[in-house]
């Protein structure tokens, strides 16, 4: 397939995934900030929402204060923020238009209808809490529909695999960013000093990766920060964990390699990261430092994006 | 202006046979049911994303072309005549182009003045002596047809460069079949759905000799911001070929390749929807980022077929248009089946003076214009506009032609005040491959939605209709 088509599919999937992640982040932050201050401590949750979205610096070019109104606006409807939900949806639609021939009609319909629907939100803003909640739900549903359409209607060929690469690379990045910002509340048992204060932080983390129920099914335990870290990093059964994203990345890259009759640097690099995750234990990670581990992962993950681009997309 | 010929009711108000069922159906169908389906159609178009861009209109970069749900219907015998005339016309266009870029018999026979060719900006000297596979220059033609009575089809314009609109022919039919199955059940409408297959086989049939047994065809688009982008992606999809932009292509050793995820892949035929000027920055406009450096050199080497060929603009130029009846006679020794609109060539002094004296009654068009931009419709224009045009004409007479204001036929159309006659034209698409010329029965009917308006161009507020050719 055309390199440009593959590139568009890859980024289309990333934009949709990112839009959903932003919606989840806003949703989770709204919940935690709705609690009385005694439960959440003194940290500014809106600041950490900006950080997990990777726009902590650019925000202050446009606003003075990281409060609910400003942050919600910047992350959702702002045209100034290159990775706002709005710009993700706009970019996804533009990419879809460029690669219409590689999309199934269901995928196109999902993106195009959402884009039409959301024009009103861009011009009017997200409105009151109720309208905001509706908007955030709509964005998440759009992503689910898009993912579902891709899964159910696409031919299992390189178009599908490149699109999946985009999903998993972006998802891994998102999960890693939450961990990066919140790692200090996820310390191992012996170091943990938090009280009920952190409980809501933990819930919030799980909620932003839609894993609250999953946690209980996997561990059958009350919330323990080190288990949350284990779930998000090493548990292959949770679709948003780093381990699961890398199983998928390796599988999709292998499929491309087999179809093209050639393996290359991206297959090797992805396998390297996957092996490291497979052979890691939380104890070691804690020992070496969660923060360092996550930062290294973020760099490795973004390096994979570059290698894929060089090998296939240009 | 006198009442125009109506496709449904003729001149005298007698229902024409092809419209009998439709008329009966319209009487049975309540107005609100029609309105409901009209809205449904609009919703479908928007969801499918069938939009077009209007240049210079920042507000609405993506607009819908209004769709009118009342079909335009033609009988089998009308179509047979039209089809014959179209094949004759396109054959003459191809022979003319071959001649112009080779022996130039027609110039030596003094049928067409030389300077009209050689001074013409759409004439491409690069094509002199260049052979194209099977001598086909115009693989895809869109011939704009109008009628003023029941007996004659008149060509308004030949589109021999990159005619668009065929996606509407196909999508209009899809949507009509979805919305009005009952109406279809009462007619025998010839299908149009084989157009993409016919197009693909025509394109493959003209692959260069150096191509593999299974030639690779690609559709080249200027990109998502082009007004006809939807159509480009639609056709690429229906044909199952890659939709490429200039940056996806690269020329090496006079062969054209596309950049794919598996490396470079040779391309043999390019169905290009990019104008000549933007094909190759080395040959044409150096400032163009849309093209492929070296493409013309691969073309000259005979390693790539471009459809349509480079330089076809000389055949659909409005100044050349006025010579089409002579062109048909010259190459085919036949009388033209399709008529021409009477045309005054402003480059000729006596024509110019007639035109200047009668501006208020005439339509004046730029020789190189298209899409309804830059034309004067005398009867509808203000005094000031007419005077401005008079100046332009005097300054650059060779840039214009003039035609009488024709009463284009009308067809019943949904309006705010119920069904009313609106003027229509028809663009059928003529495909020429190495072994045959095909015209899918139908075409794009464009309708001027404003009462009394004669301008059907989508860029000027025109709409479209489904076009039905009835089987015997």
Image: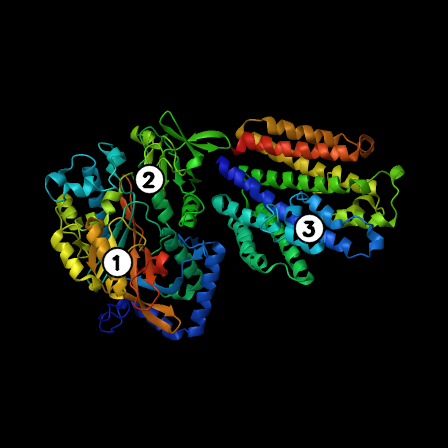
Q: Chain of mark 1?
A: B
Q: Circle 2 sits in a helix, a strand or a loop, which is it?
A: helix
Work out whether mark 2 precedes mark 1 in sequence or the reverse, and give the earlier one.
2
Residue B388 badge: 1
Q: Circle 1 sits in a helix, a strand or a loop, which is it?
A: helix
Q: Can you say which quadrant of the picture contains the N terminus of chain B?
A: bottom left
Mark 2 vs mark 1: in front: 1
Q: Find the distance from the CA under tag 2 to the CA under tag 3.
A: 50 Å
Disc 3 designates what residue?
A64
Asked if residue B361 can be seen in this view, the reply is yes
Residue in the image at 23% along x and 43% along y: B314
Q: Residue B83 placed where, x, y %?
A: 24, 53
Disc 2 designates what residue?
B277
In this rendering, the answer to whether B13 lies above or below B462 is below
Residue in the image at 84% along x and 44% along y: A224
Say few, some or many: other residues with alpha carbon within 10 Å of mark 2 (under 14 / 14 to 19 / 20 or more). Answer: some
In this rendering, the answer to whether B44 lies above or below B237 is below
Q: Nearer the viewer, residue B24 or B68?
A: B68
Is B110 left, or right, of B133 in this rendering? Answer: left
Mark 2 vs mark 3: in front: 3
Q: Find the distance from the CA under tag 2 to the CA under tag 1.
A: 30 Å
């Amino acid at each position: 397939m055309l390199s440009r088509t593959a590139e568009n599919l890859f980024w289309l999937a990333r934009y949709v995934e990112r839009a959903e992640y932003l919606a989840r982040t806003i949703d989770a932050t709204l919940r935690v900030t709705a609690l009385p201050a005694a439960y959440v401590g003194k940290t500014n949750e809106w600041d950490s929402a900006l950080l997990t979205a990777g726009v902590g610096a650019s925000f202050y070019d446009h606003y003075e204060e990281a409060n609910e109104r400003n942050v919600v606006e910047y992350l959702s409807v702002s045209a100034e923020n290159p990775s706002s939900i709005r710009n993700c949806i706009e970019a996804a639609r533009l990419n879809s238009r460029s690669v219409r021939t590689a999309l199934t009609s269901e995928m196109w319909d999902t993106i195009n209808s959402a884009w039409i629907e959301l024009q009103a939100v861009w011009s009017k803003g997200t409105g009151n809490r109720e309208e905001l909640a509706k908007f955030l739900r709509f964005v998440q549903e759009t992503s689910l529909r898009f993912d579902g359409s891709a899964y159910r209607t696409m031919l299992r060929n390189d178009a599908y695999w490149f699109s999946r690469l985009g999903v998993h690379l972006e998802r891994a990045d998102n999960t890693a960013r939450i961990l990066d910002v919140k790692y200090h509340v996820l310390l191992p048992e012996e170091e943990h000093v938090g009280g009920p204060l952190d409980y809501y932080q933990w819930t919030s983390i799980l909620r932003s990766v839609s894993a609250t129920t999953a946690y209980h099914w996997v561990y059958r335990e009350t919330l323990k920060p080190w288990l949350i870290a284990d779930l998000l990093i090493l548990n292959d059964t949770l679709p948003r964990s780093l381990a699961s994203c890398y199983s998928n990345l390796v599988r999709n890259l292998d499929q491309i390699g087999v179809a093209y009759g050639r393996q290359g640097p991206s297959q090797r690099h992805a396998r390297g990261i996957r092996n490291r995750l497979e052979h890691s234990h939380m104890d070691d990670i804690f020992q070496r430092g969660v923060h360092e581990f996550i930062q290294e992962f973020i760099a490795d993950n973004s390096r994979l994006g570059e290698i894929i681009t060089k090998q296939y997309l240009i | 202006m006198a009442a125009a010929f109506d496709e449904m009711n003729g001149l005298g108000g007698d229902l024409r046979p092809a419209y009998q069922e439709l008329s009966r159906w319209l009487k049975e169908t309540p107005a609100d049911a029609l309105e409901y389906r009209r809205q449904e159609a609009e919703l479908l178009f928007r969801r499918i994303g069938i939009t077009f861009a209007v240049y210079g209109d920042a507000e609405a970069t993506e607009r819908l072309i209004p769709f009118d749900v009342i079909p335009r219907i033609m009988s089998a015998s009308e179509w047979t005549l039209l089809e014959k005339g179209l094949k004759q016309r396109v054959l003459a266009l191809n022979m003319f182009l071959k001649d112009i870029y080779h022996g130039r018999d027609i110039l030596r026979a003094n049928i067409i003045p030389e300077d009209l060719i050689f001074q013409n900006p759409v004439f491409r000297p690069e094509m002199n002596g260049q052979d194209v596979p099977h001598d086909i220059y115009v693989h895809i033609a869109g011939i704009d047809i109008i009628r003023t009575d029941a007996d004659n089809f008149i060509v308004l314009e030949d589109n021999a460069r990159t005619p668009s609109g065929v996606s509407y022919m196909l999508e209009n039919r899809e949507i009509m079949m979805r919305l009005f199955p009952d109406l279809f059940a009462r007619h025998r409408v010839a299908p149009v759905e084989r157009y993409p297959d016919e197009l693909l086989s025509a394109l493959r049939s003209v692959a260069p000799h150096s191509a593999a047994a299974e030639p690779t065809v690609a559709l080249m688009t200027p990109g998502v911001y082009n007004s006809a982008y939807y159509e480009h992606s639609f056709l690429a999809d229906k044909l199952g070929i890659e939709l490429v932009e200039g940056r996806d292509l690269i020329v090496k050793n006079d062969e054209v390749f596309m950049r794919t995820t598996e490396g470079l892949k040779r391309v043999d035929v390019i169905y290009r929807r990019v104008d000549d000027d933007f094909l190759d920055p080395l040959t044409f406009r150096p400032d163009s980022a849309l093209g492929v450096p070296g493409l013309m050199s691969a073309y000259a080497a005979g390693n790539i077929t471009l459809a349509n060929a480079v330089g076809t603009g000389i055949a659909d130029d409005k100044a050349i248009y006025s010579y089409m009846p002579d062109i048909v006679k010259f190459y085919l020794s036949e009388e033209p089946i399709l008529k021409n609109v009477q045309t005054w060539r402003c480059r000729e002094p006596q024509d110019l003076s007639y035109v200047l004296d009668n501006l208020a009654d005439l339509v004046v068009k730029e020789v190189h214009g298209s899409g309804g931009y830059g034309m004067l419709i005398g009867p509808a224009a203000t005094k000031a506009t007419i005077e401005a045009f008079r100046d332009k004409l005097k300054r650059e007479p060779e840039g214009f032609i003039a035609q009488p204001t024709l009463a284009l036929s009308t067809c019943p159309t949904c309006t705010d005040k119920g069904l009313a006659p609106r003027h229509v034209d028809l663009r059928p698409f003529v495909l020429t491959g190495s072994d045959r010329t095909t015209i899918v029965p139908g075409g794009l009917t464009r309708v001027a939605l404003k009462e009394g308006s004669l301008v059907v161009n989508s860029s000027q507020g025109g709409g479209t209709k489904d076009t039905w050719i009835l089987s015997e």
